[in-house]
Amino acid sequence: MESYENRPEDGIIIESVGDFIHAVKEIDSESESLGSNHIIVFRGQRTSDWSVEPSVFRDQYLSIEHDLLQKPLLQNPNEFNYSMDAFEIMTKYQHYGMCTRLLDLTTNPLVALYFACEAHGDTDLDVSINHGDEEETSYGVVYYKSDYMVAATDQRVKTVSALAHMNLNQVNNIKYVLDELYRKNVISDGDKEKWLSVEGVKEFIDIIQMNYLVRPVYSNNRLIRQSGMFMLASCFTVKGNDINDLIIEKSKDNFKKVFDGEFYIREEDKNAILQELDRCNINEATLFPELDHQLKYIKSSVKGKKSASDFVKYEPVLPNLHEEKIEDRIASAKEFKSTIQKHLNNQYENDIANELKYIIFDCTKNVDWYKENNKSKFIMKITRLLKKRGNTMNASKQTAQKIYEFVVRTAQELSM
């Protein structure tokens, strides 16, 4: 019996693209009256077993976030425009796989569905994992959230982004933080004074404890193709009661709870849905403009119609030189000797040609000289001669074989 531990009882199972579009239309109709700045965003993950969190929240990276954000600027200054603010720098880092507090989202539900239908794991895995007598099934998942979008230039976004760049491991009281924000021209002197007051500090705390849906500047083709959006995670914990003693710490959180709901895709339905998405022009090649993804898509989508045979080195098929009987008179016929002599004179110097002629005519005096049991003697004599003339043993054998074959074919042709 299957257990669906990671799927709530009311979770919606998606079995086709049509199912998904119908479900999305229902949630979209509920938010139509909320204004133009209100959007629905989606996030697809290949398995519901995973947590939902920005990459900097994983593996102890949060404690060195300020270093991770600073070192690329120092080592590769030419990659960054001097006018780029802290949020723009993070979006560029996100594109290249650097740890940030940005969570990738999309406004295109079909893009999210594509990512949810990727195979669970780097390679194809079994769709089920055994736990005792139960079998746990892995699901792909699409999370969705209906909320208001803020601009990348919004002061709240600038404030949280600037805090991400700050080292709060040593000095982290609220006065130090606000002084630094003022020094970096993120906030005004008026903001600083207001937020250092008993009446205004709650406003600042609310700003640094909210998460923001931000549409980035579409500075790269991947963002454009994936209709990219970001959730800027704040998660700054504020401790203390007296305003003069308040300290600010970087914290992490699991963002599953901030989404309004989710859709689930069974592992066994993923391939069929990916094929439907491909027909809708949603695939690796359209979502990822980089060449390696383009080539990977072509390789996976264009498959050979028949399996290739194993390699066999070409060897010319020689006629069976011993099937037909050669009349005894042929070897002594003038035409046979003339043909052999002409061939040797065309191929070799006079002295070698004469020695070869002597060996050939001597060998062909014997009855059934062309038979298999006499072949080795014939070839051996010519090989010895050629080797004495400075050829290698292998080259001498090959040449002797060719001469023997020519002699036999000539005799066979004259016998017809």
Image (cartoon, rainbow, N blue to C red):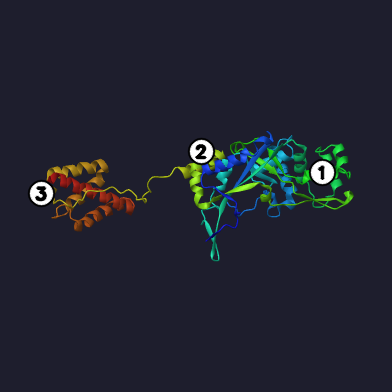
* Mark 2 to mark 1 CA distance (whole Å): 45 Å
| Mark positioned earlier in the residue sequence (2 or 1) | 1
Q: In this figure, which residue is indicated by the disc labeled 3?
A: 329
| Mark positioned earlier in the residue sequence (2 or 3) | 2
- In front: mark 3 or mark 1? 1
Q: Where is residue 215, by image quadrant?
A: top right
Disc 1 crowd, CA 10 A, few/some/many (<14, 14-19, 20+): some
| Mark positioned earlier in the residue sequence (3 or 1) | 1
**Of the residues shown, which amino acid type is indicated by label 1?**
Phe
Residue drawn at 37 percent across, 47 percent down: 306
Disc 2 crowd, CA 10 A, few/some/many (<14, 14-19, 20+): few
Label at residue 280: 2
Residue 288: image x %, image y %?
A: 56, 40
Residue farthest left in this picture = 329
Badges 2 and 1: C-beta atoms under 8 Å apart? no
* Mark 2 to mark 3 CA distance (whole Å): 81 Å
Q: Nearer the viewer, residue 20 or 346?
A: 20
Is residue 193 depicted above or below 310 in this figure?
above
Q: Nearer the viewer, residue 377 or 145?
A: 145
Q: Nearer the viewer, residue 20 or 62?
A: 20
Q: In the shown orientation, is residue 165 left or right of residue 142?
A: right
